[in-house]
Image (cartoon, grey):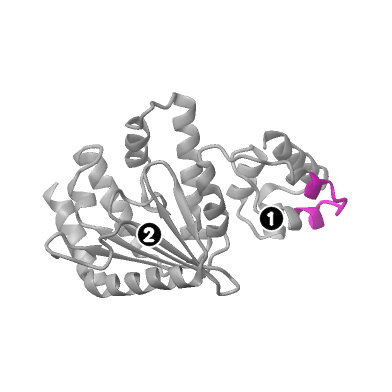
Amino acid sequence: MRTFGAVIQALREHAGLSREEFGEQVRFSKHTVASVELGRRMPDPAFVERAEEVLGNTGALRKAAEHLARQPGLAAWFRQWARMEGTAITLYTYECRLVPGLLQTEAYARTLFTEQLPPLDDGQIEAQWVARAERQQLLRNRQNTAFDFILEEHLFRRRTGGPEATRGLIDHVLNMARLRNVEIQVMPTRRESHAGLDGPMQLLETPENKWFAYCEGQRGGLLISDPKEVSVLQRRYARMRSQALTLEDSVGLLQRMRGDL
């Protein structure tokens, strides 16, 4: 990946383009361009195709991209879903175990990484955070994508990382909730039952209006493409949206929890 990125950078500089100028032509942010060039991010197929067109259309980048096989910081079983996230037009997430990666702060995420077993070394922790921070750019860069989150109240009550980290986390989630393309609801602890008790789930709509689901466990994840199975999860998620607090009440609860810290 570093070699591929170095080739991209050399061709870009040979063409006399800055990262920002090149990013405008391939329709990706300059931050994404930098991440690809530094070997921190697996380039999306669209990135490779547009880069080919901008940098001479020799076919070399397409050939080289076929040999890219790993993305630091992302588990192998998650990479396919992560690629789909990059082009999704709708993404729904229900989480009952921890705050989703797209909404995590660095302090919160690093707490999770340092608690993993078997332990991660410093380089692995750094790679995990870099990959997660890069994914989080989706919320701001894909303004036409609808992101919807349902989060259990106890995720914030646990105070993962301590009071200071939790204050920063709540502040960050509240800021994300102000984005036009992001909706965040809290499932209150006082609700005795709801439609998502079987566990966390994610639902995704592609630009072709096809829906997929993803469910994750301790040591792996399952990508679901069967329309009947996806439909079941869609109905459950729709029910949960009616059972969770409203958007306004969710913000109010988060603000009160922030004040209690």
Q: How many numbered dots are placed on residues in this image? A: 2
Decide which of 198, 164 is in the foreground and name it.
198
Question: Could you say where residue 261 lies in the image, as x and y percent from the top left?
Answer: 14, 46
Provide the residue designation for mark 2.
Answer: 201
Provide the residue designation for mark 1.
Answer: 45
Q: Amino acid at mark 2?
A: Met
Helix, strand or loop at label 2? It is strand
52 within the magenta span: yes
Question: Could you say where residue 64 lies in the image, as x and y percent from the top left?
Answer: 78, 43
Highlighted range, magenta: 51-63
Q: From the viewer's perspective, tell me whether residue 208 is left or right of residue 233.
A: right
- In the rendered view, tell whether residue 2 sits above or below residue 63: above
Q: From the viewer's perspective, tell me whether residue 63 is left or right of residue 259.
A: right
Helix, strand or loop at label 1? It is helix
Q: Residues within 10 Å of mark 2 (few under 14, many from 20)?
A: many
Q: From the viewer's perspective, tell me whether residue 59 is left or right of residue 66.
A: right
Decide which of 131, 23 is in the foreground and name it.
131
Q: Amino acid at mark 1?
A: Pro
Residue at image coords 37%, 47%? 217
Question: Could you say where residue 128 lies in the image, as x and y percent from the top left?
Answer: 47, 37
Q: CA distance from mark 1 to mark 2?
A: 26 Å
- On residue 101, the disc is none
Q: Residues within 10 Å of mark 1 (few under 14, many from 20)?
A: few
Q: From the viewer's perspective, tell me whether residue 224 is left or right of residue 62.
A: left
